[in-house]
Image: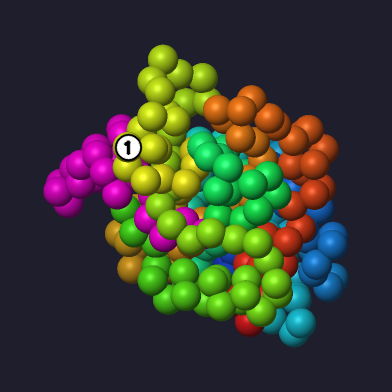
Amino acid sequence: MIPTPHNSATEDQIAKTVIMPGDPRRSKMIAETFLENPVLVNDVRGVQGYTGTYKGKRFTVMASGMGQPSIGLYTYELFNFYNVDTIIRVGSIGAVSDRTPLRSIIIGRRAYSETNYLMFYRNNGNKCGFVNADESLCGKAAATAERLGLTYNIGDIFSSDTYYSDNDDVATCLENNLLGVEMEGVALYLNAQRAGKKALVICTVSNNIPAGIELPSEDRQNGFKDMARLALEMSL
């Protein structure tokens, strides 16, 4: 079913590797900063997708929107309809301790969630808990971060369904040794596993939740270039 109601690109316009920020404006920034001859291939609902080349390899940079249902929809179609092999999410994450300072990078080895998204695939025996990233991508990301001299941590993350909640997400992270809170990782990892494809979450720390310290939105949009470079370099 191509194009889909959510993606106007033809199959040949989408690369086998997709770099996926949440914010459509960040998608535009990454494409214009790093890709040679980027072409806008999707703008349905303002979810911008661009395809171009980086150091001779073809990439698509496409936004996911916010939350598990949104990234779940787009990645399901990319994996299953557009035959994408690999999706690397590049997004922001809220830290829960000082061991992951602002602007540092977190590579999500596993994502933990209590999301109902897992229950949609309950016939596979899924339940609340951890979903794994692709192990080979984790290794490549860590090796590439070392080569680029980036400040990073690799570990488990928390994928929350809500930005505002009665639940104590910080306590959940500390109890489960999770590095921080984001909102998309579990849906991405689950879709990749079901499709037999590869996925990884790479996030930049945008705020420290217990300390109440937060980077401005402009920094979130334009200042997170290191993780985009990391995602591209590890995929060459």
- Specify the farthest residue to the top: 166
Q: What span is colored magenta in the figure?
A: 107-130
Q: Look at mark 1 in the image and give the residue it sits on.
A: 175
Q: Name which residue lies at 51% across and 19% down.
A: 164
- Figure quadrant of residue 115: top left
Where, by quadrant of the figure, is residue 155 drawn? Answer: bottom left
Compared to residue 108, the image places residue 169 above or below, namely above
The reply to whether residue 76 is in sight is no
Q: Position of residue 103 (x, y in %)?
A: 70, 49
In this picture, residue 179 sits left or right of residue 171: right
**Closer to us: 74 or 90:** 90
The answer to whether 138 is drawn above or below residue 40 in the figure is below
Left or right for 132, reference 144 = left
Q: Report whether residue 173 is seen.
A: yes
Is residue 128 a member of the stretch shown in magenta? Answer: yes
Count of picture labels: 1
Image coordinates of residue 90 in percent, x first then y, are 61, 54
Quadrant location, the C terminus: bottom right
Question: Relative to residue 124, is residue 90 drawn left or right?
Answer: right
Residue under the point 75% across and 84% down:
56
> Callout 1: few (<14), some (14-19), or many (20+) C-alpha neighbours within 10 Å?
few
Q: Is residue 75 magenta?
A: no
The coloring applied to the image is rainbow
Q: Farthest residue in the bottom direction?
A: 56
